[in-house]
Amino acid sequence: MIPIFNPREVPHIAWSEHIQMPAWTEQNWQLLNRALIQNALMQAHDVPDLWRQDISLSENVRYAAVLVLLIEREQGYDVVLTTRAAHLRHHAGQVSFVGGRIEVGESALQAALREANEEIGLNRQDVTVLGVMPDYQTITGFCVTPVVAVITDILWQKQIIQIDEQEVDQMFTVPLRNLLDRAQMRVHTFEYAEQTRRFLSVTHDEFFIWGASMAMLHNFDLILRAGFK
């Protein structure tokens, strides 16, 4: 079965090689803006080698959406992340984006914004949606649509953050360049369903960021790289 990790501890598990990719140049970080991200997301389905699933899904697929929320700061973009409440049935304690199941009659966009409001009190009127990434299928049977949105630092500072303790343990932010630092990113392997599986991770401060969230960030990296070409 899939290993369970304390999100604040690096697990004792086999390491494999880094994914060999050149580091972002400082020029690329300076060029990164809303227009580039939006244009890159419009072409996301044409980007090769995206990670799309942990395992093959059963027929009982459940649809969900997450909000990849970027804060525009003077020094660059930060990403909003949470640790999930310890009592939850799926992915308890893990670092994740805000998000959850898509309800009947909702779009992925509507679900991501609703969940962000419910989980951390985000005012959906203050964010600008830039686009969506291709769906990612998790090992627990969810088909997740990542919705990418941006908020200015001024509007972020005005948010009245209210954590829903039934869903979220805590919220924190991480610089995007730290999450996409290939020198820090690791590839892990484990056995599941008689197959060797792999997942990515980055350690930031006391947080071990891995699994589906890290796979979606890896995809975001590939999509943005394609946008620079």
Image (cartoon, grey):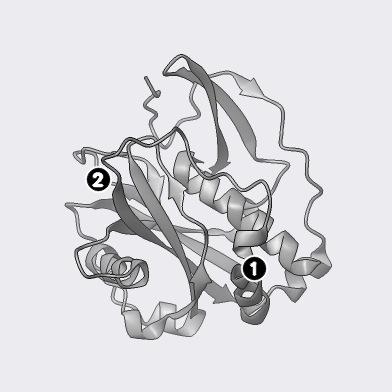
Q: Is residue 120 above or below residue 13?
A: below
Where, by quadrant of the figure, is residue 67 drawn? bottom left
Instruction: Mark 1: give few (<14), some (14-19) or many (20+) Cα within 10 Å.
Output: some
In this picture, is 4 found above or below 99?
Answer: above
Q: Is residue 165 left or right of residue 159?
A: left
Q: Which mark is residue 85?
A: 2
Given the image, on which type of amino acid does mark 1 rest? Answer: Gln
Residue 177 in sight from this viewpoint:
no
Residue for point 42% across, 58% down: 145
Report the side of 128 relative to 185 (left or right). Answer: left
Hey, what amino acid is under mark 2?
Ala
Q: Position of residue 198 (x, y in %)?
A: 55, 28
Q: Residue furthest top?
A: 194
Figure disc tally: 2
Residue 162 position by quadrant:
bottom left
Residue 158 in the image: x percent, y percent? Answer: 37, 82
Q: Name above or below for residue 229 compared with residue 82.
A: below
Q: Identify the residue at horizontal 62%, vertical 31% (top origin).
A: 187
Q: Residue 22's mark?
A: none
Q: Quadrant of the N terminus?
A: top left
Answer with mark 1 or mark 2, whichever residue precedes in sequence: 1
SS class, disc 1: loop
Q: Nearer the viewer, residue 26 or 59?
A: 59
Q: Is residue 162 left or right of 173 when viewed as pictured?
A: left
Q: For this view, does 132 lie left or right of residue 223?
A: left
The one of 36 and 158 positioned closer to us in this rendering:
36
Residue that badge 1 annotates: 43
Q: Residue at left 77%, top 39%? A: 20
Crowd tier of the residue under label 2, counting other residues whose Cα lies within 10 Å: few below 14, some 14–19, many 20 or above: many
